[in-house]
Image (cartoon, helix red, strand yellow):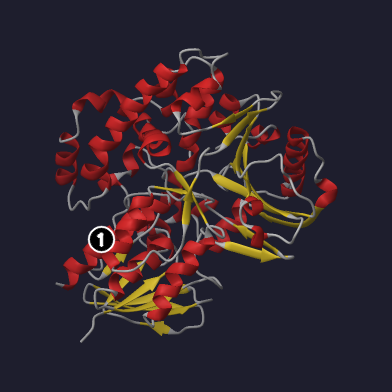
Amino acid sequence: MKKKVLIVGAGIGGLATAIRLVKNGYEVEMLEKNEQAGGRLNQIKKDGFTFDTGPSFFSMSYEFEEFAKDCGIQLPFEYVELDPLYTVNFRGDDKTYFLYKNIDKLAEQFADIEPDFKEKFERYMNKAGALFNDTVDIVIKRNFDSLAGYVWALMRVNPVHIPVLFKSFWNHVTNYFSSSQAQQIISLVAFFLGRTPFDTMGIYSLLSYTEFKHDGYYNVKGGMYKIVEGLVDVLNKENVKIHYNTEIKGYTEDKGALKSLTDQNGKSWSADTYLINSDAAWFRGNIFKRPAYAPAKLDKMSWTMGYLTFYIGLRCKLPQVNHHNYYLGTNYKDYAENVMKNPGTLQKPYYYVNVLSKHNNDCAPEGCESLFFVCPVPNLYHKQDWSDKNQIVDSIIEDFSERIGKNIKDEIVSRTIYTPQVWQNRFNLHRGAGLGLSHNMNQIGIMRPRNIDEKYKNVFYVGASTVPGAGIPMAIISSKLAFKRIQQHVS
């Protein structure tokens, strides 16, 4: 008789694990709080426009290819490599930097401010590559059952990297580059972890290696939500039922195991094994009512920043704007050092703009453009009142218009804003922290909420706030680690 697994949450981690399970003979059923799958990797269709709501590109494509091979399927979406990876513009400077993977093309752009950029960049990349190759298989892509096992794994990492553990990403980068432009551009990737270069460990400079050398970044044809649609299609063909608009509110237990989960309508859902794709820390505190994860305890943990995201449909084209773009102000260091706690720093923010319709014509009506803006902001622990959201959005649109030489205000025909409050309420994110728990020394590896429950032997976790961490490729790795846990439990 097939063992049944009930999965709570249809984010990327939950969907990928569901496919792994069903392809290995398990019966799988899924519950999803919202009206469609995807979690933070989601989509808005409005006023004839299509918007990706969360990630707009991904890295480590080989993790998807390995996933497809493990499951015996063809990858159900198409992706194309980005080159340049993205562009960067500084306020008050007409120059736009194109982040090419080709080091000579990249170095040319820094000739006037950092003449020896190529040599410095090669040294930086050599270190980033060593960090990646010496840690990813030993620490990131493994389950740990004890602190001793985790420490033993760390001891296998080349000790030459120890000094980087005690440096911030910013301090590490500034050891290699002298110009403020190069320092800021190279350190931007730290924001992808949901914190800033000033409070992210230097060891995460390994992400620079994944950007420029190891694999690069990729777009998905038709938009990022095609990943979700493709995975859901695989599950549909396997007759896996996803119950939407179903939010878990309670549970029952029996003899050290979870017996059932209860939704908002009082309906009970039961299985042999349970996989939680909701935030691993939030679920333990809010559903299982664990004292160690009570709201006051959660507040003492280190969380990622909030995100102000907004989705703009224009009745015009913007040929002068590239697909992926970062716009930096004149106060990068002040902004980055204070964004987590000082809302006043939002006056001159750094922000990202994705023109989804640039290479995906179906995502906007003819002659129109679909834009996705992301601005890192304080989460709800530091800023509860977002009644000023329209004022902030207007200021960013004004700044963007000035930089591209076209006033887009009167061209807007669709406008949707997600504040940290929306992200919190829609995706059960503590204090609206966009990427869940941060990745400091006390919240990585065995120190992160584990993917196996501390009380119920038949409950497991997958996703951003458990191992190995946040990001699309990490969700795919997390699904493999969770699948291994379930296999071990069942056998």
Q: Residue at x 69, y 32 (%)?
A: 348
Q: Dot 1, how many residues are within 10 Å of its Cα: few (below 14), some (14-19), or many (20+)?
A: few
Task: Report the label total.
Answer: 1
Horizontal and vertical percent for residue 247? 49, 73
Horizontal and vertical percent for residue 266? 47, 83
Is 361 in front, or is 421?
Answer: 361
Q: Residue at x 59, y 56 (%)?
A: 53
Horizontal and vertical percent for residue 198? 47, 28
Residue that badge 1 annotates:
454
Q: Residue at x 47, y 72 (%)?
A: 32
Instruction: Say which quadrant the C terminus sits in.
Output: bottom left
Three-letter code for the amino acid on which mark 1 is drawn: Glu
Image height of 11 relative to 298, above or below: below
Image height of 391 relative to 336, above or below: below
* Quadrant of the rendered image containing residue 475: bottom left
Specify whether 178 is left or right of 408: left
Horizontal and vertical percent for residue 273? 27, 74
Image height of 157 relative to 355, above or below: above
Query: Is residue 9 visible to the viewer in this orientation of the structure?
Result: no
In what element is the residue under mark 1? loop
Query: Is residue 381 visible to the viewer in this orientation of the structure?
Result: yes
Specify whether 320 is left or right of 38: right
The residue most toward the bottom is 1
